Image: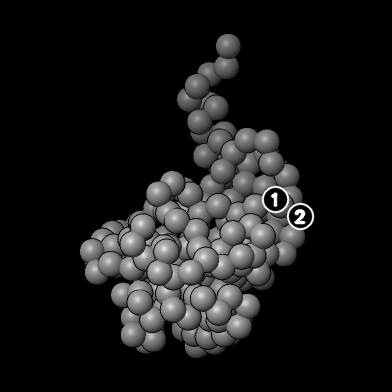
Amino acid sequence: MSNPIFSRRAFTMGALAAVSVTAACGNGIGGQGSQTIDARVRATLNEMYRSYPNTVQLAQKANGMLVMPLVTEAGLGLGGAYGRGALLINDTTVDYYSVAKASGGLQIGAQQYAHVLFFMTEDALSGFRRSPGWAAGADLEYVISDRGDSVEAATTTALAPVLAAVFGRAGLRVGATLEGTKYTRIIP
């Protein structure tokens, strides 16, 4: 019988190591700070609007959007993900955030992707901004499927206070889920 404290400690240390490795995988900000994040956010939004035109309607209806231009996720048994982005309200950056995720289980590979969270209600946006570390849950509704289909804004805005678009995937890992992902306000 294995020691449960050692197992938890090994899992935690492995997850922290995986997140540290993914943080160094080309999505760091470097010396330009907020200017680099803002440029990446604009490029990501332009690509999303071009590839998935229905997201324009979502953006217009949303109270705010959290844009994560590049999230790197890797795993070999233990895994992690890391990226940085910005919260936009009325098309203006109001805060910067990091995203981190640790995972365990049968997994191997790496991928990079972008994602945008649409806060469709003022309550959802306020709850996100007040939280010292907001975690995406299973109730998050996706508006771009794995096939790359974009759904109509009218059909989703009544269903969930927070909608997610995950796109631009590259790599060898299957799927990208935001469940268990933690967002934390940063100063770039």
* x then y, percent, for residue 177: 55, 52
Q: Secondary structure at mark 1?
A: loop
Dividing the picture into quadrants, the one containing residue 185 is bottom left
- Of residues 144 and 18, the one drawn nearer to the viewer in this rendering: 144
Residue at (52%, 66%) from the top-left corner?
A: 151
Using the image, tell me which numbered label, if any, was put on residue 172: 2
Binning the other alpha carbons within 10 Å of mark 2 as few (below 14), some (14 to 19) or many (20 upward) gives few
* x then y, percent, for residue 111: 69, 59
* x then y, percent, for residue 79: 62, 46
The residue pinned by badge 1 equals 174
Q: Give amino acid for label 1.
A: Val
- Of residues 29 and 170, the one drawn nearer to the viewer in this rendering: 170
**Is the residue 55 above or below the residue 81 in the image?**
below
- How far is disc 1 from disc 2 in space, using C-alphas? 7 Å
Using the image, tell me which numbered label, if any, was put on residue 156: none
Name the front one of labels 1 and 2.
Answer: 1
Residue at (58%, 75%) from the top-left corner?
A: 52
Binning the other alpha carbons within 10 Å of mark 1 as few (below 14), some (14 to 19) or many (20 upward) gives some
**Is the residue 133 above or below the residue 6 in the image?**
below
Residue at (61%, 83%) from the top-left corner?
A: 50
